[in-house]
Image (tube, helix red, strand yellow):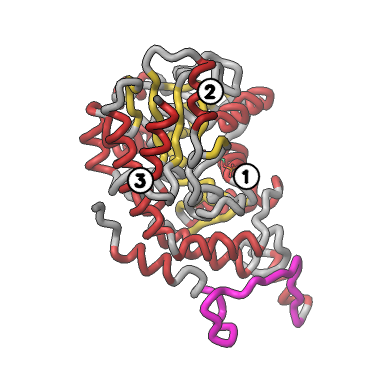
């Protein structure tokens, strides 16, 4: 059994307590208002001059969303957090807010497809990008350019879940004057704290484990007060990816059970991965705890892994890979992950940016839900028979 940080459990349980004390309600009130009236014009103008911290208009700040932001900032040990209408809203705000024409962004590891699609779009605005699959910090340093302004990482990476030496990469980037950001969605703030490893920003799709019930789309970016404030004015307010107060409420509610859900996801995914590793039809299990090369990094920078991992099938055609996925009963065929229900997804033949991918098409990505490891193993047994 992994040990979570004792403070994190309390932070999650008290999610929303940062909101005003409304009649002692144990859950935060949903402030379903698009604008906030002030007593005087002077007060309104004063609020408009610091919209990142004043309730003026809900495209900027909203009390329910603020309660969520305060809780997420605490969990990531960040000075500040800004929430967004989706994970891609958070990614867009970071890329548009930090980069300008002439800058280069280096993506390291397997990156969520639409993030690279957005980078390809940014090319049309004079921002260049490249991707490194190296894990050695010197090899990554060799791919930095004089105009590299941002190093964007995923660790664990998408689909193959390989890890990066996060602290070393952050130190290297800092020495070269570049900012660092990590998409920490897969690990959640409970299992990895990128800011403590030296990252400038960490971001999340809250649509996964943070929400945890497959009923809400949201995103978040955490970092220093200065950086978050700068993103607020330079991109968040202008791009308009706003989280609705009701969705913030759902995310606060999800946070209350996050520690217990993550412990269960971690344990059950390990049991399922253990079973699959011994299965004759499986040639590789892509899970940080099962990857010999990443073992030291896993123990050093993560407290555990979530319920998400993938397996490569031995000598299996693409058609048979799809047929195996179709035979599964507990694992639903769907995109996304992080909810109570188990899900399965196949690899892609090319990445969404249209380039050759190193992810095999005969890969099955599994999101281990909360149905119980025995049920899931029995389901896989019949589908692989
Ligand atoms: C690693 C990662 N980052 C970002 C996103 C985007 O999040 P959203 O779907 O909430 O926009 C996803 C979505 O699958 C993801 O897997």
**Residue extending furthest toward the right:** 41
Q: Residue at x 38, y 49 (%)?
A: 372
Q: Magenta stretch: give its range.
A: 18-39
Across and down, in percent, residue 167 comes to 30, 39
Q: Which residue is mark 3?
A: 373
Q: Is residue 34 magenta?
A: yes
Q: Is mark 1 within 8 Å of ligand 1?
A: yes
Q: CA distance from mark 2 to mark 3?
A: 22 Å
**In this picture, residue 353 sits left or right of residue 311:** right
In this view, 313 is above or below 18: above
Q: Is mark 3 within 8 Å of ligand 1?
A: no
Compare residues 143 and 109 and report the one nearer the observer. 109
For label 3, the SS is: helix
Q: CA distance from mark 2 to mark 1?
A: 31 Å
Specify which label sits upstream in the sequence, 2 or 1.
1
In this view, 145 is above or below 189: above
Q: Which residue is mark 1?
A: 89
């Amino acid at each position: 059994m992994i040990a979570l940080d004792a403070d994190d459990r309390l932070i999650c349980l008290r999610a929303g307590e940062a909101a005003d004390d409304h009649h002692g309600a144990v859950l935060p009130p949903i402030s379903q208002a698009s604008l906030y009236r002030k007593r005087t014009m002077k007060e309104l103008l004063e609020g408009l001059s610091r919209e990142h911290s004043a309730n003026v208009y809900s495209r900027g700040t909203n009390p329910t969303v603020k309660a969520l932001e305060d809780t997420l900032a605490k969990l990531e040990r960040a000075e500040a957090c800004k929430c967004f209408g989706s994970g891609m809203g958070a990614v867009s705000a970071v890329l548009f807010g930090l980069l300008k024409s002439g800058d280069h962004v280096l993506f390291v590891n397997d990156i969520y497809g639409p993030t690279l699609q957005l980078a390809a779009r940014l090319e049309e605005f004079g921002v260049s990008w490249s991707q490194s699959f190296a894990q050695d910090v010197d090899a990554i340093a060799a791919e930095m350019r004089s105009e590299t302004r941002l190093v964007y990482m995923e660790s664990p990476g998408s689909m193959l879940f390989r890890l990066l030496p996060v602290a070393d990469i952050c130190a290297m980037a800092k020495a070269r004057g570049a900012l660092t950001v990590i998409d920490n969605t897969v690990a959640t703030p409970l299992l990895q704290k990128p800011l403590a490893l030296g990252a400038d920003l960490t971001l999340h799709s809250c649509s996964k484990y943070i929400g945890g019930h497959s009923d809400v789309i949201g995103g978040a970016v955490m970092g220093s007060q200065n950086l978050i404030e700068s993103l607020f004015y330079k991109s968040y307010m202008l791009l308009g990816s706003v989280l609705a107060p009701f969705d913030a409420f759902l995310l606060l509610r999800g946070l209350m059970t996050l520690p217990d859900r993550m412990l269960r996801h971690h344990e059950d995914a390990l049991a399922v991965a253990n079973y699959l590793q011994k299965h004759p039809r499986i040639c590789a299990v892509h899970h940080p705890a099962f990857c010999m090369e990443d073992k030291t990094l896993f123990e050093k920078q993560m407290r555990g892994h979530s319920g998400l991992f993938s397996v490569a099938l031995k000598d299996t055609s693409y058609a048979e890979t799809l047929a195996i996925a179709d035979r599964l009963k507990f694992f639903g065929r769907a995109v996304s992950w992080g909810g109570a229900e188990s899900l399965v997804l196949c690899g892609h033949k090319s990445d969404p940016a249209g380039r050759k991918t190193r992810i095999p098409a005969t890969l099955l990505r599994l999101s281990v839900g909360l149905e119980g490891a025995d049920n899931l193993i029995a389901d896989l047994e019949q589908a692989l028979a």
